[in-house]
Image (spheres, rainbow, N blue to C red):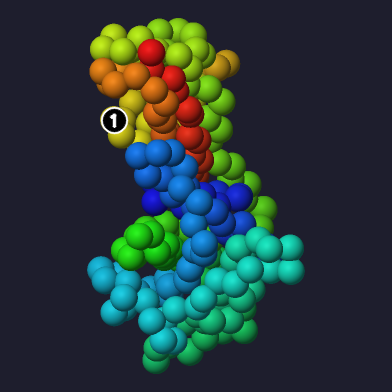
Amino acid sequence: MLAIVTEPSALPLDGAVELSVLTVDPDGPRAVDAVRMRACAPWKFIADPARVCVGDDARTLELDVDGRLVASAAALAAAFPAPPGVPAPADPWRAALAEGLQLRVPIIAEVDVDGHTLVARRDLDVVEATTTRQNPRLVELEFDGTSTRTLRAGRRYHFYSPTGELANPAAQLDDPEALVPATTPVAYTAGTVVGSTWVFAVATDETGGMSAIAVPLTIE
């Protein structure tokens, strides 16, 4: 799993986020039968989700009537009103934000692939309803300044993202204030085996926003 993407990028009070995952293998994006997700208590230190994010410290995220995986602030606040032994006010999360406390809900995603369980984590900020956060958008990957998706075997390329940070290897923005922000170039050498392959990119920002794309390539 390369990314857990939420829309919007933070959980607003009185609101909800929709979640999705990008799961891949060497042949490209990987379809999976099911993704299991659960939210963990925001005050827990999650070193081992299998032991810590369980029981009363976990809430399973279910599909809604439209088939979407959704987490709502109201449901999570009801599940995790306050740490054990601490009296919870009537509206605990709103009171916590009003006191200047940071609320961050760990989201655990699990996918079974070929007899193995893949586990990923995404920490989701809780923000005031009036706070607007958006995910960065990956518009295009460019190779030597063009959006071609056919590369020459063995040739060295540079690929770009118009915004954000490439997952691996990483690239920072040259000028975040530019009309079309682009990353510094990152070297990419096409493999010597001709055929189809993929490049995956994950963009993140300083607010915790995230987006991901999968770009098919042809090596000839």
Which image quadrant: the C terminus? top left
The x, y position of residue 54, in whole percent, is 38, 81
What residue is at 61 percent from the left and 50 percent from the top? Answer: 8
Q: Is residue 142 above or below residue 200?
A: above
User: 50 or 114: which is nearer to us?
Assistant: 114
Q: Residue furthest right?
A: 65
Q: Is residue 82 above or below residue 46?
A: below
Q: Residues within 10 Å of mark 1 (few under 14, many from 20)?
A: few
Q: How many marks?
A: 1
Q: Taking the image as drawn, is residue 5 in sight?
A: yes
The x, y position of residue 22, in whole percent, is 47, 47
User: 175 or 50: which is nearer to us?
Assistant: 50
Q: Which residue is mark 1?
A: 169
> In the image, 28: left or right of 51?
right
Q: Is residue 174 above or below residue 8?
A: above
Q: Taking the image as drawn, is residue 142 in sight?
A: no
What residue is at 67 percent from the left and 53 percent from the top? Answer: 130
Residue 109 quadrant: bottom left
Question: Could you say whether the residue bearing mark 1 is in a helix, strand or loop?
Answer: loop
What residue is at 69 percent from the left and 68 percent from the top? Answer: 64
User: Three-letter amino acid code at disc 1?
Assistant: Pro
The x, y position of residue 93, in whole percent, is 55, 72
